[in-house]
Each structure stands twice: as C-alpha cells, then as structure tokens.
Image (cartoon, coloured by chain):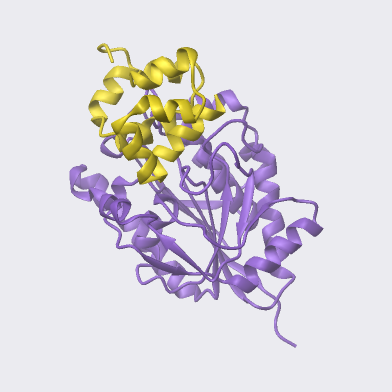
Chain colours: A purple, B yellow
Amino acid sequence: MSEMGKIVGAFTASHSPGITAWPDRIDQRQRVAVYSAYEEARRRIEELQPDAVVAVSVEHFTNFHLGNLPAFAVATGDSYLGPVTPEMGQFLNVEQHQYPGHAGLATHLYEFALEQEFDPTLVEGGLAFDENFCVPLKLLDPESRYPLVPVIVNGVNPPWPTPKRCYNFGQMIRRAVEAQSAAQRVVVLGTGGLSHRVGTPEAGQINTDFDRDFLERLESGDADRLIDYQREEIDAAGNGAHEIRTWLVAAGAAGTPFEVLTYEPVPEWLTGTSVAAARM
Amino acid sequence: MYSLHKLLWDIRRDQSVEASYKTNPDVVLDEYGIDGDWRGWMKGLDFKSMYEHGINPYLLYFCALQLEVDRAAYYAQIRGEKEG
C-alpha cells in the first residue's frame, strides 16, 4: 500500500509585480534582503522534493468578476497558462508559459472539501494566472517543475471569507493531503500581502505596524491570535492587505509557527514585502 | 452597479469591447444599460466619483490602464489633486 500524503513544508510570500518587473529600482540593501529570502525559500522547497505544491492565492479579476466571485475555488486542471496575456508577461517580466497541474491531488482536494462541509467552487479548466502565482513562482520554481494545485481565496472584493474560515480551510487542506497517496510530499505556498493599496487614494502607504504585528503573530504559532482580526483592522493596512488570507490558509495547513525570512516595506513596490517558512 | 463593474471588467478582458468603447462610448454604455450619474462618470472617466460611490478600485485602476490613462494621472485624480 502506498504511503499516505504529508505536508512537508509551508511557505508564504508577497507577489507584488515589482518583485520581478523592476527589481533594480529599489534600495540595494532591501533588494539583497528580499531576493536572498526568496532564494532561501526556493532552496528549502527544492530540498523537500515535493510531488505537488498546493498554491494558495487571490486572483485580481483575471478569471473571476462580480458576476461570479467565489470565496474559495479549487482548480483541478492539468496545466495553467500564466501570465494570462503576453502583455502581462512583458509587464511582469515573466515569460508566458504553461504551469503543470496536479489534477489527481486537486480533484481529491475538491471532493474532500465538500465532504468536510467546505464548499469551494470547482474550476476544472481555464484558470489563468496573473502576478498571484507568476511572480513568486519565477523565484521559487523558475523551471516550473512542481505540479500545482491552485486554490483561490477572494481577497479583492468585500465581503471576504473570515480569517477563521481561511485558517480552517488550511487545516482541511492538511487533512485532505493526509487522506490520499497520489502526492506523498506536498508543499503549501500562500502568496499575497502584506500591507498595500491598489487603485485607492492611499496607494503607496505601507502600514509597517500592521505588517510587523501580523508577522509576530505568525511567528508565535498562536492560531487564536493569528485569526483575531476585524475587517476594519485589515482595511487600515489597505485593500491589498486582505490577501493575508492566503497566509492564514498556509498557516492552517502547517499548524506550526513560522520563521520570517524577510520583511521589507518597499516603497517602489508599494508593498510590505515578506517571505516566511513554516517551522516544520 | 453590476453593469458598470461588468463593463470595467470587459474593457480589460475583451479587446473588442475596449476598441468599441474607445470609438463610441455611448453605444457601449447603451448596450450595458448604464445611465444616470454612472453614465456621466464613466463617460468622463471620473474614477474618483465612481470609487466614492462603491466601485471596486481594482477594476477601476485596471480599466484606467487599459484605456491608456496614465498611472500617475489616475492617482492624482482619485486623490483629488486635480480635476479628472
């Protein structure tokens, strides 16, 4: 009998377009800190030799719109196009290509979620990536070797799923992985955040107090504190800060404290930029 | 509000909608059934008013870029730094 699956690592990272699009525009000290952290995460993921990566992010109205906006979605395709257009590829400095999917694990995750009374939307095909996955994966899996199970969380339009629900969704992902054997070594990657603002008058403001407090909670491993956010508290860090939900999903899947590999408020990227790894 | 959200999304996603809107916005606004203040704000690319009346800022910003509104001009307008 095959060994059952296991989550062998969990990582979280920002996905600001500037990370791949204009790395040279930022302060050299910050550049070294940020890219060293992504490289450390890439190295650790490679060492873990994952059979699949459950990649959790928001999507920025690339696939969904306000006529169809799931709180959670699980994609079960064999492959995914990213970036969605050649123009976006040029903008992000990411060559447009197909990313491999792990349809077996993804289908199991979708079915398991329903059995566990979570009700994600099914995306059997056609999901395309924007900066959500293309930016961090260029640094974490530059050859697109790891088969992906994309999970989308609404982080772009209120109302959003609660922080508790996101954490619990991550716990469900862990149980799902442990209840199958198609992918034995699984890494979870959450991307987005931290504080930033898109399209609003306050764009460019980075809320370092919010970011540092969030990362301290993440490092503590105290789930109750990690999910103890009201909407207004996250609003204070910008509409883009609601993407921390992807980190909460990853934290729920890991069930352990995290190590923050870097945190830099990068004004040129308009984003509190961070990379973290679960202490597993 | 949904019709306007849909138009903003379609302009970004569908080159034919974008081209039609640039050529003859009234025809497209009619097709989407957008009237009243919303129509005036959209036709005038008054992103500030649309934002203040609840339109999603991601969709506003992406649509503005698609319509070749300069990024700095978008933010200046939405901050009320100059007339849109």
Does the rendering let one see residue A94? yes
Residue B74 percent coordinates (x, y)? 29, 25
Left of B18 or right of it: where is A211?
Answer: right
Left of A50 or right of it: where is A15?
Answer: left
Residue A188 percent coordinates (x, y)? 56, 61
Residue A223 percent coordinates (x, y)? 66, 44
Q: Nearer the viewer, residue A224 or B6?
A: B6
Left of A185 or right of it: where is B63?
Answer: left
- Classify B58 as above or below A19: above
Residue shown at 29% from the left, 32% from the top: B23
Residue shown at 30% from the left, 24% from the top: B75
**Residue A114's quadrant in the figure?**
bottom right
The quadrant in which the N terminus of chain A is found is bottom right
Q: Nearer the viewer, residue B43 or A212?
A: B43
Residue B19 percent coordinates (x, y)? 31, 39
Count every numbered label the image shows and give the total: 0
The quadrant in which the C terminus of chain A is found is bottom right
Does the rendering let one see residue A207? no
Q: Residue furthest bottom?
A: A1
Residue shown at 39% from the left, 57% from the top: A134
**Residue A271's quadrant in the figure?**
top left
